[in-house]
Image (tube, grey):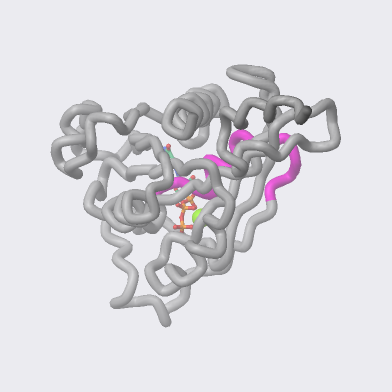
Amino acid sequence: MTSPSPEPPSLEPALQHPDDAGGRLALKILIAGGFGAGKTTLVGAISEIPPLTTEERLTTAGEGIDSLTGVERKTTTTVSLDFGRRTFTRPLPMTLLLFGTPGQDRFGFLWDELAFGAVGGVVLVDTRRLEHAFGALDFFEERDVPFVVAANQFDGAAHCYAADEIRNALDIDTAVPMVDCDARDPSSVVTVLTSLVRHALATRT
Ligand SMILES: Nc1nc2c(ncn2[C@@H]2O[C@H](COP(=O)(O)OP(=O)(O)OP(=O)(O)O)[C@@H](O)[C@H]2O)c(=O)[nH]1
Ligand SMILES: [Mg+2]
């Protein structure tokens, strides 16, 4: 007689990559958002290893292609990816592998490659330039990848938008969690990432 088949796994295969260190899950997360939204800053704020960055100086070649309105002091941009890693014990033992996307439209072709195997994403919204988040929102919605929206409240923003205002302005589904964030502040980034993991687990189980 054959033994009863084991319970089907409660998590998607993408969530089942125990690493070598004590069976923690290794979860890949994409940090996305518009040009200059704070993606590289967020990865660097939380990573427990020196983050891998691929920053290059902005040159006149990008003039007229990438709008610097609102981010005039920006001097570099990510040309390939950011990578960082952070280990957590809650909501479950896990190592988050954080991949930051480049923000410029011309590097959009890299996003699918970076997103491969990701359990979820963060859409970082620059509160001075809300409309620049549409590309990242569409990216996750079209691929059915769970995501949270993190409103990066920049000091120079003319308005401090409440979560509901951003949700309405960007037409974000009520099921998508909204989180306030300061991409420079590790404790704030922890809140963003744990909310994403909870959301991804709830969505995929
Ligand atoms: N005041 C404030 N400044 C921030 C915050 N997050 C990022 N910055 C600054 O904004 C600038 C741009 O941040 P980056 O982290 O390079 O933005 P990015 O999204 O990686 O940019 P790209 O890769 O070019 O798309 C940097 O000078 C940061 O120091 C924030 O929460 N508050
Ligand atoms: Mg960057």
- Picture coordinates of residue 184 (x, y %)? 51, 35
- Picture coordinates of residue 117 (x, y %)? 58, 51
Of residue 202 and residue 26, the one placed in the foreground of this image is 202
Residue sticking out furthest to the bottom: 61
Q: Is residue 119 left or right of residue 62?
A: right
- Picture coordinates of residue 72 (x, y %)? 35, 58
Residue drawn at point x = 19 percent, y = 44 percent: 170
Asked if one can make out residue 70 in the rendered structure from this viewpoint, the answer is no
Q: Is residue 42 magenta?
A: yes
Residue sticking out furthest to the top: 90
Of residue 18 and residue 79, the one placed in the foreground of this image is 18
Q: Is residue 133 left or right of residue 191?
A: left
Segment colored magenta: 37-51
Q: Is residue 124 left or right of residue 11?
A: left
In which image quadrant can residue 88 be found? top right
Of residue 92 and residue 36, the one placed in the foreground of this image is 92
Quadrant of the image for the N terminus?
top right
Total labels drawn? 0
- Picture coordinates of residue 70 (x, y %)? 28, 53
Residue drawn at point x = 42 percent, y = 46 percent: 145
Q: Is residue 183 magenta?
A: no
Residue drawn at point x = 40 percent, y = 39 percent: 147
Residue drawn at point x = 32 percent, y = 62 percent: 68
In which image quadrant can residue 93 be found? top right
Asked if one can make out residue 32 in the rendered structure from this viewpoint, the answer is yes
Residue sticking out furthest to the front: 1
